[in-house]
Amino acid sequence: MENVSWFALSLLVGAVSMVLALALMIYVLRKNAGNEKMKQIHDAIKEGALAYLRRQNRTLAVFVLVMAIVLGAVTSFLKGTTMGFAMAIAYALGSACTTLAAYVGMRAAVEANVRVAAAAQKGLKAAFPVAYYGGAVMGLFVVGISLMGISVLFFVFKVLLGWSDPDAASVVLGFSFGASALALFAKAGGGIYTKTADISADLVGKVELGIAEDDPRNPAVIADNVGDNVGDVAGMGADLTDSYIASVVATMIIGAEIASETLTVLPLTIAAAGLLSSMLALLFVARSIKKSPGRALNLGTFLTCFIFIALLFLVTRFSGLEGNSWLGVFLPTLAGLGAGIVIGLTSDYFTSIEKKPTKTIAEASVTGTAINILMGFSYGLVSIVPPILCIAAATIASWYLARAFGIDPFYGVASAALGMLSIVGTIISADAYGPISDNAKGVAEQSGLGEEVIAVTDMLDAAGNTSKAITKGFAIGSAALTVLALFAAYTHLVDIKTLDLMSPQVIAGVFIGAMMPPLLSAMLILAVSRNSERMIEEIRRQFREIPGLAEGKAKPDYAKCVDIATAGALKELLLPGIVAIVAPALTLVVLGRESLAGFLAGSIVSGIIFALFMANSGGAWDNAKKYIEEGHLGGKGSEAHKAAVVGDTVGDPFKDTAGPSLNTMITVMSLVAEVFAPLLLLMVSR
Amino acid sequence: MENVSWFALSLLVGAVSMVLALALMIYVLRKNAGNEKMKQIHDAIKEGALAYLRRQNRTLAVFVLVMAIVLGAVTSFLKGTTMGFAMAIAYALGSACTTLAAYVGMRAAVEANVRVAAAAQKGLKAAFPVAYYGGAVMGLFVVGISLMGISVLFFVFKVLLGWSDPDAASVVLGFSFGASALALFAKAGGGIYTKTADISADLVGKVELGIAEDDPRNPAVIADNVGDNVGDVAGMGADLTDSYIASVVATMIIGAEIASETLTVLPLTIAAAGLLSSMLALLFVARSIKKSPGRALNLGTFLTCFIFIALLFLVTRFSGLEGNSWLGVFLPTLAGLGAGIVIGLTSDYFTSIEKKPTKTIAEASVTGTAINILMGFSYGLVSIVPPILCIAAATIASWYLARAFGIDPFYGVASAALGMLSIVGTIISADAYGPISDNAKGVAEQSGLGEEVIAVTDMLDAAGNTSKAITKGFAIGSAALTVLALFAAYTHLVDIKTLDLMSPQVIAGVFIGAMMPPLLSAMLILAVSRNSERMIEEIRRQFREIPGLAEGKAKPDYAKCVDIATAGALKELLLPGIVAIVAPALTLVVLGRESLAGFLAGSIVSGIIFALFMANSGGAWDNAKKYIEEGHLGGKGSEAHKAAVVGDTVGDPFKDTAGPSLNTMITVMSLVAEVFAPLLLLMVSR
């Protein structure tokens, strides 16, 4: 078949990306890892991070095994044993690939932390490339392996085994579902872990004992560093990868359903073009790195976009679509990309330390803690307006642009999601850069490298702020469009032609679905609170029972805190995880398939609202505190600062646990609907 | 026509209710108003409250005049001058009737405050009836005048002028729209007023100066007392009345649209049965009042329900509906009433001082302010689950129960809303009881009546807690069903047969509509913050510039603070008010009528979520503070108490400004859609 050359392209780009990632890993490893004390700290972080990953992966393995068997059995029953076997394999493979990628990425981050701190002794320009390339390992490896996984599976089943497009696309859906299992664990579990450690270390360390954030006497300090790696690097990477794979797969499924081979394969090619753009931009940016670190990050994002637009034009124009119908893919993809950038920039406005909202929150801290909380809460709610208008506009634009050129309108919406996510290699790289710089600062403080070095790491961190905001905007905006695409794929699958919002089942489904994101947010925040209480108890115990700890003469038991965070995170993840899987299934069984469609729609809408609100209010509170710490409004130690610290602590689980987990949760709910709907419908109809 | 006797009934019940309200007013006025100092305080509160009402009504009058002219012009253009004239009159009348009722109710509350305090000197049993009947004035007068207004209008246009049912129902819609104008001002404006005064008085008085909550030296103390009357009594009454009228009118419109005279008139009769039940229950409860005040309030609610169910059976059974189709009205109405009670009881669970959530929040305060905030936030989110499941269940149940007996299913949903709201006379009475007791406590403190008397007023306040929670549950639950009924009426009006949730316009509309409640909440909270800043400045100025004020030798300038709260509240109301009116209109013009339907659906769903979350988290924070003040976890003055005070302050605008205003806002948006859709459609189609 003629499309084999396209497969070769996506396989090739995926492989090159993984090789490049490993090359960058070697680059990082060759850098100087600092003095003896730094190596000790590095070893402790590495040990803690690996301990978490080991335990997470053990639990994940059991979960994946059970789910693979269920999925295989369900599919065998519905579509025959071969298909069932294929689905189970694809599911396990999706989970395994993304787990491996998260491991490699996190490993790179852990190695980079200490080396960035060491390089910071030579100044900003020596330290920046280490942090930048350390983050790029995650970005390139995870996207490369995902693209290869999808391509290989589709190639094997379609070309080698000769299956039909819809069947082969179904197998790839299994891969996506498997990836979402890792995302659920990495994002929600990692999110609980990181905020447990952060809040506990702060509350006992800063508030009760009055010691600095990264003081080595604090037993929770290593757990806190580990948290940045497992929650922020591995978690955010897994979340974006999950959306990325889901958007590619949803577009392929819709393409297969409308029986167009070209449209089924095209998403792979577009994804390959995006990954290629990320790599090219990385090479270009390498030159400008030494000039201005802050600008290099933004240049990376925008350069990726420009190269991608050029490549996108080429691959759609010469995709073999007849007449000018290529425009029906090109323009929606472009609309999605544009919406993603606008969403990112407006998120930046609402959370940047230099803009009005954050400054207003900082000023409100002078009046008191309650006003700081109310202001952050309110601006967080206002911040949802531009992204939601963008998502609405992108949905309408991609729908009509696709239809105008004879492409299925839902394929257009899915292409918009793909457009946002195709540059995800650069996005994840820039995102991982943040926690690496943050951790480098921690290592510098704990190993006593002095104020100057800490100042360099602070500047590194600040340089990544705009990129970080754009990343979060992309993550949430793309999740919205991806889940809309999955929603469309679901309705195709269960044969719903129109979904009447005036029927009581749909209304009830929308109500119940819309209730899920706030409920899951609350469960995750309560999980962090409960887990923190356990850890605070342990920190206090160590200070009470270990003689000489407070004076810095004895070493705390770091491993014990790491252990509490690890065990607690996985335990607390259980309930929200079960709810996210059972609620859509229950809705289907009790109220029927139209209710489930309403459920998905409701959960998308309120999920986006809560995800945006929590991410942005948390970011604004954080920066309001930093603004005061810069010396404004009384500076560190003032009443205003105390109020801002409370705001920051409230915002922590908002922006790093509940907010970002919602993306994953709504993707999981959509995939549950998609995968299990056929069986449950069969049971119901009996 | 045969239905004239039914009209006579609803007119009669409405009139009797108003007379009974005035009789209770005289009962209250005849009670002893206390010593000279109490009379002074009473005069100051009365003056402040009347000043607020005067200014509110002046602004409202301009607003209503403009809107009446626009409405009249629009309707003239569409349906002829007579109809336009009728609509404008009905609109002005709706606004005037509810304004008068709010005035009478608030006046009764102001008179009752001081007399409850005076009676408290003789003990709990002497004080309770004064507070109870003081609240009942509001409940009975406002519901009576609303019922009369609707009945008279419908009687004049249908029976005297011989208009068709749909035309006469449209005129009544104008009445409902007019009532919502007052509700918007009273609830949102009053909500901003009351929380401005409360937060300012607390932050400067309690926190900066360390004086008691109702210390007469605080310049904001009278404004705070006034706020309880204008925000909590007049505001909550207006909100419930607005929903009440809207539910009656929406049911009538659907009845008229399906061309059944019986079903058009039946809602009036059901409403009359509900009001009659409220009055009968009130008379019965009068006997048990002297035994146990707390139980008397609950008995009032449940007795009203039982009498109403009996009367409901009679009026539906003998309504003249053929065969057993009366069951298609009876059962949905019952389902609505049941859902309202369950919602109320679950709200009670999440906010009661004796239940686990509030205690957990109080215990979290020991760990720190941030954890208190996170816990209150999380439990507030969890608390939305039972009410939303109830609303979903009531929607499905009323739909199918109606259809099973041959009644239009949307008529069933509207009947469920009517079922919840028909006992609103008792609900508003119990609700107004709360702030009256609260204010009595304030008067007792300011006039130095001693600890014992204050303790009695505290117990009065506590007795109303369950009733208050049930009230809020009813208010939000019934608003949800009412707006669903309005939504149905809108789709009838613009001739939408099915509303496809898979069309991009509907999806975009849902997204934009769902964004409105969080946006409006944020605007209202920011309004409170801004207004509080102005007032705090003024309080500090008075303490700085008035010699002898801090020592209690000079009187503060109470009027100045009242003035700031008044002017600020009305000014700050402008923007959210405009947004609530313009956003649906803009959606219609830019995206079309299907988008607007999606917009309404989205705003209902997220409106309910945010209204419930804010009401319940605010209530829980408040009671967590009270729990600590009772002497638990360190009691007053402990670190835990300080943390709980911050939580309470954050919760104040949640539960008393933004949360309850959302009901009104979504009703206003629905009515805008309903009233202006025809004209705007005409403009668009050109």
Image: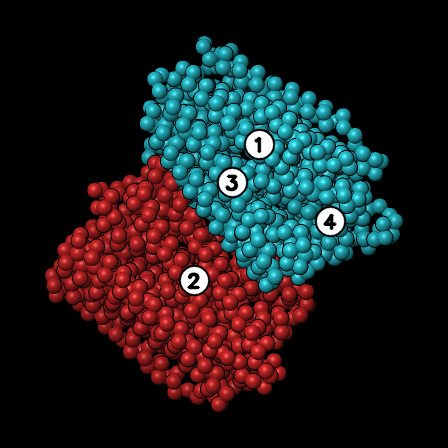
Chain colours: A red, B cyan
Amino acid carrying mark 1 in the image: Leu
Q: Dot 4 falls on which chain?
A: B
| Residue located 25% across and 67% down the image | A93
**Both marks 3 and 1 on one chain:** yes
| Image-based side of B239 in relation to B638, left or right | left
Residues under numbered marks 2 and 3 in contact, where contact means CB atoms less than 8 Å apart: no
Q: Amino acid at mark 4?
A: Glu
Which residue of the protein is positioned furthest toward the bottom in this rendering?
A36
Q: Is residue B623 left or right of residue A469?
A: right
Q: Residues within 10 Å of mark 4 (few under 14, many from 20)?
A: some
Q: Along the line of sight, which residue is nearer the eye, B77 or A655?
A: A655
> Residue B253 appears at what percent x and percent y?
44, 24
Disc nearest the viewer among 2 and 4: 2
| Res A268 visible | no
Residue A605 at what x, y percent from top left?
Answer: 41, 49
Please identify, in this view, whether the residue under mark 1 or under mark 2 is nearer the observer. Answer: 1
- Asked if the residues shown at circle 2 and circle 4 are in contact, with their CB atoms under 8 angstroms apart, the answer is no
Q: Residue at x 38, y 44 (%)?
A: A510
Question: Which residue in the structure is indicated by mark 2?
Answer: A572
Figure quadrant of the C terminus of chain A:
top left
Residue designated by label 4: B213
Q: Above or below — where is B77 with respect to B610?
A: above
Q: Earlier in the sequence, mark 3 or mark 1?
A: 1
Marked residue nearer the N-terminal end (4 or 1): 4
Mark 3 neighbour class, 10 Å CA radius: few under 14, some 14 to 19, many 20 or more: many
Q: Secondary structure at mark 4?
A: loop
Q: Which residue is mark 1?
A: B299
